[in-house]
Amino acid sequence: MGGGDWSGVGRGTRGVHCGQEPDPATGAVVTPLVTATTYRQANAGEIGPGGWEYSRSGNPTRAALETALAGLEGITKPGCGALAFASGLAATTCVIQTLSRGDRVLCADDVYGGTNRLLNRICNPLQGIEVDIMDLTDTASACASVTEAHKIVWIESPTNPTLKCVDIKAFAEAAHAKGAILVVDNTFATPYFQAPAELGADIVLHSISKYINGHSDVIMGCLCVNRPDLFERLQFLQNAVGGVPSPFDCFMVLRGIRTLHLRMERHATNAMAVAKLLEASPKVERVAYPGLPSHPQHEIAKKQMNGGYSGMVTVWLKHDGSDGAGLRASNAFLNGLKLFCLAESLGGVEGLAEVPSVMTHGSVPPDQRKELGIFDEMVRLSVGTEDEADLLVDVAKALDAVP
């Protein structure tokens, strides 16, 4: 299920072709949807010539998707590849299941709320896994904090929702020097704009529900694994625990992947325009977008992102400081939007907007939200693929509605 050697081939070409070669049985140019749960064996205990036995263990449509995902992430080592799961958190849980009681994880302080909840409210108190939360943007200091006790260093770049950027190569070197593995959640950047495995990451995680599928109609996650021993162990856990996606969902994502490069270019162009408009507004306190020179880690983003900064923009709105004023400002802005839909999730072709403090990151403890700057006046925009001019008009009118 490895991705094959696609070195020297552009990521757009990989998305169109890797894992999606014409079907040898029929010549179909679209990967067949195989819904069978089980497969005939020639003799008892003797798996047939196709290598398929039971669809939790492996399915032809899922295998094609896993090949495509590995190719997108540039996973080319023998014995490595990608593994698909029923959700991004199922993929995260699979990684955590490689740990034992007393093991330590060093995790970025700003990560997806579900990851924070899983590590701090389940893995730590119920499984005895120690979790160290740290701001990883001070590269030298944070890298020096990696110890032999850490089994995993877990980062996102850009992070969710404050869009911090972390030096992936530096943390890969720091983790490996202490015998730890580096896990990079690459959901926001996507394989089109960032290649963590090429920067030294051992595992690249995606919530496929977001940009990779791109149409807000599939829940799925994946692990792209760049070490043969880890791939073997995680593949065993994928089968043993059974959190796998349906063949139909795999078929849907294969279709989405074919336009990933086209969508991401549009997302990034639109997001840059929206970010500049917001930054120029007197009603805005601050804007976070890695492509803006004002972003604190803009140089890191330039170094490790491949010519684009994805479609996520976070904005802090000004308000008068009275009780509830932050949420009132956010709601006024959100109610003024017509093209952006107020909804959780991100990465679909349509624009989405949300308030992380009471939505996606509501499960993060209040003191940690405050430390991170996840206030009620913060709005996270997933900028869609609509016409740029229409999006700018929509955002400008929404700003007019802010007190």
Image: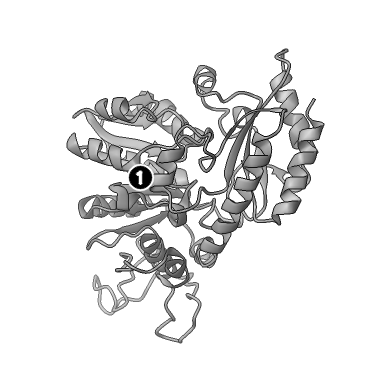
**Left or right placement of residue 171 versus residue 158 in this view:** left
- The residue depicted at 75 percent of the width and 33 percent of the height is 333
Q: Residues within 10 Å of mark 1 (few under 14, many from 20)?
A: many
Residue lying at the far top in this picture: please name it.
322
Q: Residue at x 50, y 77 (%)?
A: 30
Q: Position of residue 80 (x, y in %)?
A: 26, 59
Quarter of the picture containing the C terminus is top right
Q: Nearer the viewer, residue 119 or 71?
A: 71
Image location of residue 39, percent across then percent down? 37, 73
Front-most of 173 and 22? 173
The quarter of the picture where the N terminus appears is bottom left
- Residue at (32, 76) in percent of width and height: 50
* Kind of residue at badge 1: Cys
Q: Secondary structure at mark 1?
A: helix
71 to 238, vertically: above or below: below
The percent coordinates of residue 42 (x first, y second) are 28, 80
* Relative to 77, residue 220 above or below: above
Q: Residue furthest bottom?
A: 26
Image side of residue 119 versus residue 327, left or right: left
* Residue that label 1 marks: 94
Q: How is the image coloured?
A: one colour
Query: Image check: 216 left or right of 387?
Result: left
Give 262 or 128, whichever is nearer the viewer: 262
State whether residue 128 appears in this view.
no
Left or right of 284? Residue 197 is left
Is residue 236 in view from this perspective? Answer: yes
